[in-house]
Image (spheres, rainbow, N blue to C red):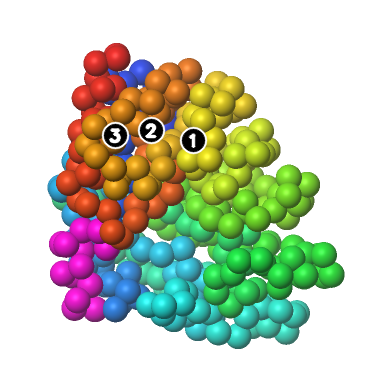
Amino acid sequence: MNNTFLMACRGEKTDYTPVWIMRQAGRYLPEYRKVRQKVDFLTLCKTPELAAEVTLQPVNILKVDAAILFSDILIPVEAMGMKLEFSESKGPILYNPIRDEASLLMLRGLNPEEDVPFVADAIKLVRQQLDVPLIGFSGAPFTLATYMIEGGGTKNFINSKKMMYQNPALFHKLMDRLTEAVIRYVQAQIDAGVDAIQIFDSWVGSLSPLDFNIYALPYVQKIVAAVKTKLPIIYFAFNSSAMLPLVKQSGADVIGLDWRIEAADAVKALGTGCSIQGNMDPCILFGTRTLIKELVSHVLKSCEGARGHIFNLGHGILPETPVDNAVAMVEAVHELSSKVR
């Protein structure tokens, strides 16, 4: 197996910079859209054969150095008892949001083997056909909590912050429940055969550094401490460039970066105790091949001082992205990083 990705996670010397793309199994691929014509999104997540098929597609098409399991961060939340629906126009909708003690008490504990067996089944199917590492993942407790409290996506997080500031005890109870569920969920993926775990904290950038330190960081630290000795952990705290020293305190092996910071500045802020992942703007992939190659070179040079570097976009690849440009980016990473080494 090509272990370049895992070596970079651990800060070991590699022959080239490994690359994968967040949301690399998705709507920009015609092959994915063909599968999606048969089933709705949740059914795709819950059908191991189909989830495995779309997980493998970008590895075969783009030649990336790691696969990430096709699923959704809200899968364990649904398994805890919340009704989940995906709307093409509104995104995820969670009915009966958690707003009080009674609604919190309605949540079940997560038993991955019984509640989400399709996740482990998909991992086992992928492992049979994969020659690069497989990344499992989970949403971070804070991000999951915001979906559960708001009932879906939000721009201002009013309900979540009202709970934080008006009833912090209730908020921390929810975070405790979610942290326990995430640890179990991640452990089930590890047992099934993933090689690394990424923790997605998509909405933690809505917090001030003070609130991040109180309401989010301690719970990520518990998850990392529970599983870090078993395999590499990546923590992607989106839109958190202003508080990278705090993000580093998560203890993760790899810190994911969005595109809102120069990678060289992030390397200085984080020091040598962790590797980094990122961080090209996803919209660069709408540019010319020449521009893509120039920006790949810029990111690679910016990351030269890092303990280890995994090339990625600063967020998920957009559905309208030309596939050939994604391929060109991967090829440029491999070509240019091999030359500098």
The amino acid marked with disc number 3 is: Leu
Q: Mark 2 or mark 3: which comes first in sequence?
A: 3
Residue 35 lies in the magenta-colored region: yes
Q: Toward which corner of the image does residue 336 lie, by quadrant?
A: top left
From the image, state whether disc 1 or disc 2 is nearer to you: 2
Q: Is residue 116 left or right of residue 170?
A: left
Residue in view at x 56 percent, y 29 percent: 266
Q: Is residue 186 left or right of residue 174?
A: left
Residue in view at x 22 percent, y 44 percent: 325
Q: Nearer the viewer, residue 119 or 26?
A: 26
Q: Position of residue 254 (x, y in %)?
A: 49, 35
From the image, state whether disc 2 or disc 3 is nearer to you: 3
Q: Is residue 250 left or right of residue 209?
A: left
Q: Position of residue 75 (x, y in %)?
A: 44, 69
Q: Is residue 80 above or below residue 175?
A: below
Q: Secondary structure at mark 1?
A: strand
Residue 108 lies in the magenta-colored region: no
Magenta segment: 27-39
Residue in view at x 60 percent, y 85 percent: 96
Q: Position of residue 134 (x, y in %)?
A: 31, 46
From mark 2 to mark 3, how far is it between C-alphas?
20 Å
Q: Is residue 81 visible?
A: no
Residue identified by numbered label 2: 310
Q: Secondary structure at mark 2?
A: strand
The amino acid marked with disc number 2 is: Ile
The amino acid marked with disc number 1 is: Val
Residue identified by numbered label 1: 254
From the image, state whether disc 1 or disc 3 is nearer to you: 3
Q: Quadrant of the C terminus?
A: top left
